[in-house]
Image (cartoon, rainbow, N blue to C red):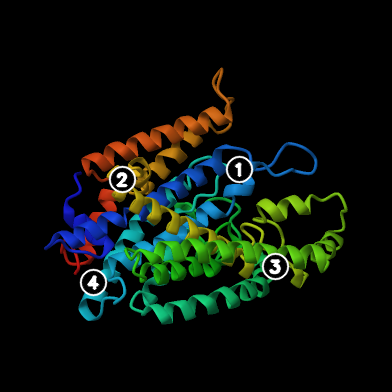
């Protein structure tokens, strides 16, 4: 399962000379960001995001990673699609159709893995089926140029949270409600309306709003990421967006009375709404008050949440690209384990879920703690990432996805 140089065509380059190969190598900072996203998602799966007190005091894991790691994963999906379908100038005509077929077949592989993992007994929301559906939904926009992508992403950020707010109560009022309450599995294909309602609107990763992440990622991926100024611009602009949206939400919720109004609507003064707004609103009934749309809480799916997490994602990508440039300067591959793990996310994420399923419902082995379980998995992920990157190997599930992609593209090794 060795990766040849043509595999780096997913970064949008061919290698007739050294310049393209060097540029593609610098873009391995994108893989490093994906490795960070994987480690962050694993942390929210293994480590507690709330303390065990009555007010559910947020832990550092909840404050740092909840909602942000998964959003980074989705934004990076859009960046990867941009890099594999022509950067500043997207593919056109027959090449674009071939690229879309390849993406669609790879999405089917990811979706099949996700549906299979849905049969595991877990208290973890598996993202893979939603991820595959996002790939399919973004196909019509693959050929758009950067300015159109930025405009569409802005409109999507503004409109879809309001649309979701209006549609969710209607879907949940159906009998039975169009919400699964569990990870999608093969058996859910028998109830397509309920499955699609959950995937698009009522589930943990609502595709309707989350498509904004892929559009933003596509737009970022069309930038000249190998230029010296662009990573710094991403870091600065992402930080401003993340901090600004958080500040605006705090003003509206605290100074303008939004949280007090929501607390009154809930009818329970002791309800730990303040903690939930900091860490996770997934599964909370966000209806009956427009103040829900003023929140930037992770997994709330509001405009401010999408903007905040997209800003964090852009900043992380910019930082990883800058670190990659630093590694080139000092001639030391500082990001080798992270970028290796980032190139193996499907295989490593699947293995992580299988490990967690084996532990679910059982006490931890003697001497083990949740921290020990996490850090042992994190170390294994980094070691495997470093080894596979050094040997230029693909992971087993990545190999299947690559084969599906090539099949869809007509068996050609790369584009442009």
Q: Which residue is mark 4?
A: 98
Mark sitting earlier along the chain (2/3): 3
Closer to the eye: label 3 or 4: 3
Q: What residue is disc 2 on?
A: 330
Q: Residue at x 38, y 64 (%)?
A: 79
Q: Closer to the N terminus: mark 3 or mark 4?
A: 4
Determine whether the residue tagged by mark 4 lies in a helix, strand or loop. helix
Quadrant occupied by the N terminus: top left
For residue 25, side relative to residue 108 (left or right): left
Circles 1 and 4: CB atoms closer than 8 Å:
no
- Element at badge 3? helix
Q: Nearer the viewer, mark 2 or mark 3?
A: 2
Specify which label sits upstream in the sequence, 2 or 1.
Answer: 1
**Residue 5 coordinates in the image, percent (x, y):** 17, 54
- In the rendered structure, which disc, 2 or 4, sits on the residue that comes first in sequence? 4
- Circle 1 is placed at which residue position? 61
Q: Work out how far the residue at label 2 is from the one at label 3, CA to CA, in angstroms.
A: 40 Å
- Residue 286: x and y, percent? 71, 64
369 to 139, vertically: above or below = above
CB within 8 Å, label 2 to label 3 = no
State the SS at label 1.
helix
Instruction: Kindly identify the residue that appears in the image at 31 percent across and 59 percent down.
Output: 106
Residue mark closest to the camera, 2 vs 1: 2
- Which residue in the rendered view is the most extreme toward the front? 330
Q: Nearer the viewer, mark 1 or mark 4?
A: 1
Using residue 385 as the reference point, say whether residue 409 is left or right of it: left
Secondary element at tag 2:
helix
- Dot 2, crowdedness within 10 Å: few (<14), some or many (≥20)? few
Q: Which residue is mark 3?
A: 248
């Amino acid at each position: 399962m060795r990766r040849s140089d043509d595999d780096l065509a997913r970064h949008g380059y061919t290698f007739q000379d050294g310049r393209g190969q060097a540029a593609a190598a610098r873009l391995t900072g994108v893989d490093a960001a994906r490795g960070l996203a994987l480690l962050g998602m694993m942390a929210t799966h293994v480590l507690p995001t709330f303390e065990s007190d009555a007010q559910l005091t947020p832990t550092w894991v909840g404050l740092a990673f909840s909602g942000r790691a998964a959003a980074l994963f989705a934004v990076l999906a859009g960046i990867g699609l941009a890099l594999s379908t022509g950067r500043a100038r997207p593919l056109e005509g027959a090449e674009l159709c071939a690229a879309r077929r390849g993406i669609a077949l790879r999405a089917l592989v990811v979706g099949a893995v996700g549906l299979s993992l849905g049969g595991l007994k877990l208290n973890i929301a598996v993202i893979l089926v939603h991820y595959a559906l996002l790939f399919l939904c973004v196909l019509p926009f693959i050929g758009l140029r950067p300015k159109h992508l930025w405009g569409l992403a802005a409109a999507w950020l503004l409109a879809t949270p309001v649309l979701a707010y209006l549609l969710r109560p209607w879907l949940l009022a159906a009998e039975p409600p169009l919400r699964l309450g569990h990870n999608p599995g093969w058996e859910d294909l028998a109830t397509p309306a309920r499955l699609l309602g959950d995937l698009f609107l009522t589930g943990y990763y609502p595709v309707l709003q989350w498509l904004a992440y892929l559009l933003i990622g596509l737009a970022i991926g069309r930038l000249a990421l190998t230029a010296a100024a662009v990573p710094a611009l991403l870091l600065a602009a992402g930080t401003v967006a993340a901090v600004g949206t958080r500040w605006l939400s705090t003003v509206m919720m605290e100074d303008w009375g939004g949280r007090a109004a929501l607390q009154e609507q809930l009818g329970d003064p002791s309800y730990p709404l303040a903690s939930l707004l900091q860490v996770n609103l997934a599964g909370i009934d966000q209806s009956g008050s427009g103040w829900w749309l003023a929140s930037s809480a992770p997994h709330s799916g509001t405009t401010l949440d999408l903007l905040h997490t997209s800003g964090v994602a852009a900043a992380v990508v910019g930082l990883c690209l800058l670190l990659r440039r630093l590694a080139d300067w000092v001639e030391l591959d500082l990001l080798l384990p992270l970028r290796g793990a980032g190139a193996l996310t499907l295989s490593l994420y699947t293995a992580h879920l299988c490990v967690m399923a084996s532990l679910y419902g059982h006490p931890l082995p003697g001497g083990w703690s949740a921290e020990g379980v996490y850090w042992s998995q994190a170390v294994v992920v980094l070691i495997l990432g470093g080894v596979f990157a050094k040997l230029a190997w693909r992971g087993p599930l990545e190999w299947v996805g690559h084969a599906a992609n090539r099949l869809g593209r007509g068996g050609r090794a790369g584009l442009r």
